[in-house]
Amino acid sequence: MKYLVLIGVLVLAWVLFFKVRRKPPPVGRPDATPQVAAMLACTHCGLHVPKAEALFDASGRPYCGEAHRLAGPQ
Ligand SMILES: [Zn+2]
């Protein structure tokens, strides 16, 4: 009878151990590698600006600002 209780405890510990190990990682955890913003060189002066802040002309060339977009390529 003593061994039956011992085996029951061991089986319970084993089941709990694997239940905990199979738990999926928490959702919404920040990625280990930070996102790097794509940089584009201004067609006029060569200054690198984030893609989100760059201005584009009709041909799709990136510029650092409105003045250089109007000035065009150099
Ligand atoms: Zn520029």
Image (cartoon, rainbow, N blue to C red):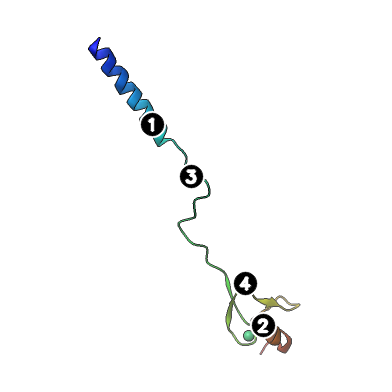
Q: Nearer the viewer, residue 14 or 61?
A: 14
Q: CA distance from mark 2 to mark 3?
A: 42 Å
Kind of residue indicated by mark 1: Phe
Q: Nearer the viewer, residue 12 or 48?
A: 12
Query: What residue do we see at 28% from left, 15% from top?
Result: 5
Mark 3 residue's CB less than 8 Å from ligand 1: no
Q: Residues within 10 Å of mark 3 (few under 14, many from 20)?
A: few
Q: Amino acid at mark 2?
A: Gly
Pair 4/1: label in front: 1
For badge 4, the amino acid type reads Lys
Where 73 falls versus 57 (above or below)? below
Q: Which residue is mark 4?
A: 51
Q: Which mark is residue 18?
A: 1
The residue that disc 3 covers is 26
**CB at disc 2 and ligand 1 closer than 8 Å:** yes
* Badge 4 element: loop
